[in-house]
Amino acid sequence: MEINPAKFIREVRSEIGRVTWPSKQETTSTTISVFIMVFVAMLFFIASDLVIYNVIKKLIGLEV
């Protein structure tokens, strides 16, 4: 099989032309959604960590 860099670049350009790129509005709304979900996940894990910490602290009788 022969490797031809020029042919490869032509094929890549052809494929890039077929890609449907998201609009600025779609990109912005998706980014905002991701940040909101990360924030919600952060709150969940902080709350879970605090609950588990307090349960374990009471189980083994540690007083800080």
Image (cartoon, rainbow, N blue to C red):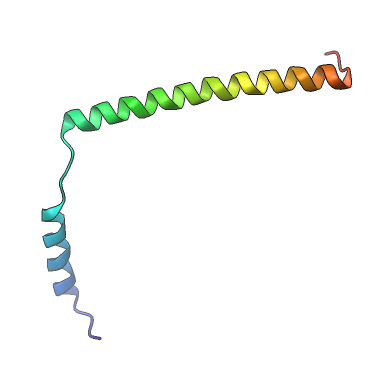
Q: Position of residue 20 (x, y in %)?
A: 15, 46
Question: Residue at image x 26%, y 26%?
Answer: 29
Furthest-bottom residue in this view: 1
Question: Residue at image x 50%, y 26%?
Answer: 41
Quadrant of the image containing the N terminus: bottom left
Q: Quadrant of residue 61?
A: top right
Task: Classify residue 3 as left or right of residue 42.
Answer: left
Question: Residue at image x 63%, y 22%?
Answer: 48
Furthest-right residue in this view: 61
Quadrant of the image containing the C terminus: top right
Question: Residue at image x 18%, y 38%?
Answer: 22
Furthest-top residue in this view: 63
Q: Is residue 56 or residue 9 the one in the foreground?
A: 56
Q: Position of residue 34 (x, y in %)?
A: 37, 29
Number of numbered discs:
0
Task: Classify residue 63 as left or right of residue 37.
Answer: right
Q: Position of residue 9 (x, y in %)?
A: 16, 67
Q: Position of residue 39 (x, y in %)?
A: 46, 22
Q: Quadrant of residue 11?
A: bottom left
- Above or below for 21 versus 33: below
Task: Classify residue 9 as left or right of residue 1.
Answer: left
